[in-house]
Every structure is written in C-alpha cells, then in structure tokens.
Amino acid sequence: MTFHLSRVSGLALLTLPLLPFSAAAQLAVSANENKAVLIDGVNTVVQNPPPDTVTIIDLKIAPPKILGEVNALTSVVGPPSSVAVSADESIALVTAATKVDPADSKKVVPDNKVSVIDLKASPPAVVATVEAGAGAAGVAINRAGDLVLVANRAEGTVSVFTLAGKTLTPAGKIQLGDAKSGPSAVAFSPDGKTALVSRDGDHKVSVLTIDGSKVEYAKRDIHAGLRPYPLDISARGDVSVVANIGIGGGDADTVSLIDLQAKPPRVVDTVTVGQTPEGLKMSPDGRYVAVTAMNGSNKPKNSPFFNDSGLVVVLAVDGKRLTKVAEGKVGHWCQGAAWSQDGKTVLVQCMVEKEIQVLSFDGKELKLTGALKVSGGPAGIGTAAR
C-alpha cells in the first residue's frame, strides 16, 4: 500500500503554524534535483528546469511528515551523502556537483556550490552559499559542529571549512589524487580525529587525520573493491562500511566492512548486495546497514540487466562480519537512505517516482508503508549524527 502526503514546492511550507521546528523532532533533509530525469536508462538534462529543492522531514513521528521545502542547488551526480545536518539540527549543508552548461543547455558541467540552510528559521531558508571545489559531492560535519569536509569529485581534492554558527570559512584543500581520482563520500569518526574519503575513480578509501582544523592525508589507502562510493562510520567509531558500485555491467556488486580499530584500518569482510549499491547508511545504534541498490532499475528496458524495481537491503553488523537480514523492493533509480533514531523506519529516495519511500523494519523484515512526494528527484539525504 502506498499513500501520498501533500506536496509542497519552492519556498512554501505545508499549511502549518510558521514556528521553528520542535526540538523533539528528528529531522531528515532531502536534496531534490530537477535538472535530470531518466529516459529509458539515459540520464537526460531537463530543458528550462524548475529550481532544485530541499525537503525537511520529521522522521521521529509515524508516519514521517514533510515540514517544508526551500529552493537550493543540488545534483544527482555523486553519492547521496550530499547533505549534512549538524548535531543540533540547526543547519543543513547541501552540495551541488553539477549545473547546466551555460554554453549547451543539453549538458551539465561541474559546479562547486555548498548551500547553508538555516533549519531553525521560520520558514527554513538558505542563508549562505559558499564555494568548495569542482564537482562538490559528499559533505560531512563533525559532531563538535566546528569542522566541515567536502569531497570534490572533479578535481581530486577535499575542501576543509571551519564552521561557527551558520558561517562556513574556507580552511584549505587536501590533494588526494589527480582530477580523475573521484573523491566521492566523506565521513568523520565520532571523536573527530579521523575521516574517510571514498575515491571511485581510482578504487581507494583514503584515511585523513585531524587535529583541530588541521586536516592531513595520512597516506593510508584502503582497497575495498571496484569503485568505492557511499560510505559511513558507526556511531561507536569501531567500523566503517563502504559500497563498491562496480562498472554498471550487470554484475552483483558489494559492500565492505572496514575495521577502524585495527592498526592500520583494513577491510575485514565483503558481501554482495546486487547491482549498483548507490546509497548506504548505518543505523544510529550501529547494528544495521541500509543499502539502496539500483538492481538494474536505471537500465534501458531492453537491457538484459533491467529490473522493474530497485532494492533496499539491510545488513547486520555482527562484530567484524556483515550478514544479510532483509531485502525489499522499492522504486527506480533510487539514491540515499536514512534511519529514524529508533531504527524502526527507513527512508529511501526514488528519483523516477520523485518520492521518498517509507519502510518499517522490525529487525527481521522490511515493509513498504508509504511515500512522501517531493518537488524533484530526491538525490541526497542526511540526518544528524548523535
């Protein structure tokens, strides 16, 4: 059964009192792309598209509820970790990896924008836009709320920003590889002393060391699989998970578990999850991993690898091993996933349907319970680390 809540667009909010979001809410923030649509397996640029949007969702209540939407730049290019929410849920950062080519409206070119969204404002609003690097993709805020990292896919770098309140200040760049190394997703350890960056261009996960606002490439690279792309670190900081998306050739792709307590950190387990695991998120308690796999739903219909649905796979983290617990069908060309704080609800972004599908999870089974319509194709999602 699928239901739809009221749709909002632009700067409008739902018909609710214009009050700051309650501290009791748990916010999920979805970035929605309007420049791209999938036409028989081809990512196609929309002519004269409406603005991209960002949707704010209360994930604490059941069913989850849309609180509002604002216009903000974003892109489906890059992993769906293109949204970061501060621990106090006061701000969200949203990256834009691409923009329409000014010289050719049928193409996109790299963009470098990071939007700062004030989630406490009524209504929420973009209060600043800063520049990172070309192809700004994955973004992360440390738990202390004073440091931000942005992976720049089109130039082989990671941008460093200090954060004070709602103000981002550039604090340098880290060179990881050449422009084709493809820094994609980035995640902080809970203590803020380490970060990991996936590099889908040269098949590495790089370790960064952090001391205050000083961030350095540790020259330690982990080789998890073919094209590591989305990644996350557990709330305890003991392990990380990374999805290896492969080359899109119809093969079953993988998720790897990285032991962060080992010296040096290393891959200790890898499991298959289906075609193209684009999105990945660990549950707040670190016990489970939700993985969104394209499953061929983004292929042309005459492709031998086409399937008329994507998959969401839940893996259990059992010590230093990954075990498949549940699997469910979702929509097409699905991107990121987010967990409720109690681990009982999973949100999955589906680009073709322009909706966020809502699934319940009881530790054994996934069930589709509804959907939230958004103004654009949901391409990136974030929740606060607690």
Image (cartoon, rainbow, N blue to C red):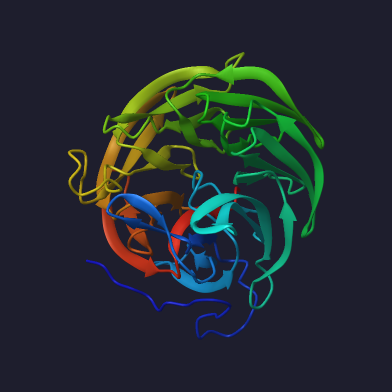
Q: Is residue 82 left or right of residue 224?
A: right
**Above/below status of 174 relative to 264:** below
x, y (%) of residue 317? 41, 31
Q: Residue at x 34, y 66 (%)?
A: 371
- The image shows residue 79, relative to residue 256, as above or below, that is below
Residue at 61%, 30% in the rendered image: 196
Nearest the eye: 196 or 385: 196
In the rendered image of this protein, does residue 40 appear above or below residue 222? below
Residue 299, percent across and down? Answer: 27, 45
Q: Quadrant of the N terminus?
A: bottom left
Please say if 326 is above or below 68.
Answer: above
Residue that lies at the very extreme toward the top in this rendered image? 263
Instruction: Name the residue nearer the viewer: 230 or 51.
Output: 51
Coordinates of residue 180 in the picture (x, y in percent): 57, 30
Point 53% across, 65% down: residue: 52
Q: How many marks?
A: 0
| In this rendering, position of residue 192 left or right of residue 358 | right
- Residue at the spot 42% in from the left edge and 77% down from the top edge: 7
For residue 255, what is the image quadrant? top left
In the image, 339 versus 14, the foreground residue is 14
Which residue in the rendered view is the most extreme toward the front?
Answer: 103
Q: Quadrant of residue 349?
A: bottom left
Q: Is residue 182 left or right of residue 322?
A: right
Q: Is residue 141 visible?
A: yes
Q: Position of residue 219 (x, y in %)?
A: 68, 18
Q: Is residue 365 visible?
A: no
